[in-house]
Image (tube, grey):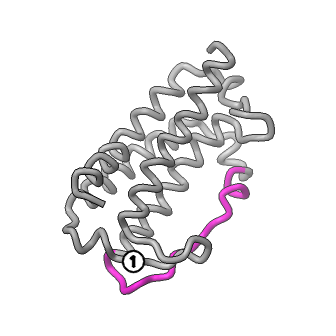
């Protein structure tokens, strides 16, 4: 990945908390408890899922940078989304958590040298992953879930 491409992706990570917050601002509890697609998670579950996922990504990046080819842990995101906190907690908690996390993660990524972005970890499901791979994946991940909510709002005329 070129430094310019990486800078764009890290910028997308920096912007993700604000985009997610803007997309859910003003939604009622009934709207937050609406699935974004049939059989899918509710908007509330999606909002709680994003920091859960990005916390794992932040840790995976730090492990890759500080250890030699570490194995990273997976988690069952579907089961996490069904836990009581993901189904019922105020979204403000997760929006605050995501913003704080990205205030740590983005400067960390911007501080790395070229060699650090190539450092590898081993993901049990995805195989070998570089820090650059995590950046690319999670920049997409934030945009992906914001788009789910945006499309639901458009379809529902909210």
Look at 30% across and 68% down and name the residue there: 117
Above or below — where is 14 with respect to 137?
above
Q: Residue furthest front?
A: 2
Question: For mark 1, what is the residue?
Answer: 120
Look at 53% across and 47% down and name the residue there: 50
Look at 68% across and 24% down and name the residue there: 31
Q: Position of residue 7 (x, y in %)?
A: 25, 50
Look at 80% across and 40% down and name the residue there: 39
Q: Residue furthest right?
A: 39
Location of the N terminus by quadrant is bottom left
Picture quarter containing residue 104? bottom left
How many numbered circles are shown? 1
Residue 49 falls within the magenta-colored stretch: no
Side (left or right) of 43 relative to 8: right
Q: Position of residue 143 (x, y in %)?
A: 48, 40
* SS for dot 1: strand
Residue 76 falls within the magenta-colored stretch: yes
Q: Position of residue 100 (x, y in %)?
A: 37, 48
In the rendered structure, which segment of residues is drawn in magenta?
65-81
Q: Residue furthest bottom?
A: 68
Location of the C terminus by quadrant is top right
- The crowd level at tag 1 (other Cα within 10 Å; few <14, some 14-19, many 20+) is many
Picture quarter containing residue 28? top right
Above or below — where is 149 with respect to 10?
above
Picture quarter containing residue 26? top right
Residue closer to the observer: 74 or 45: 74
Side (left or right) of 55 relative to 33: left
Q: Position of residue 35 (x, y in %)?
A: 73, 33
């Amino acid at each position: 990945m070129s430094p310019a491409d990486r800078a764009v992706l890290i910028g997308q990570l920096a912007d993700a908390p604000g985009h997610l917050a803007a997309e859910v601002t003003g939604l009622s509890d009934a709207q937050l408890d609406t699935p974004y697609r049939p059989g899918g998670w509710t908007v509330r579950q999606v909002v709680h899922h994003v920091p859960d996922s990005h916390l794992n990504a932040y840790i995976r990046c730090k492990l890759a940078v500080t250890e030699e080819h570490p194995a990273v842990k997976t988690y069952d995101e579907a089961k996490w989304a069904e836990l009581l906190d993901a189904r019922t907690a105020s979204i403000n908690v997760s929006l605050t958590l995501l913003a704080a996390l990205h205030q740590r993660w983005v400067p960390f990524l911007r501080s790395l040298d070229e060699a650090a972005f190539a450092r590898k970890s081993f993901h049990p499901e995805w195989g070998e992953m570089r820090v650059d791979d995590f950046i690319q994946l999670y920049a997409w991940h934030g945009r992906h879930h914001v788009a789910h909510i945006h499309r639901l709002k458009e379809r529902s005329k909210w």
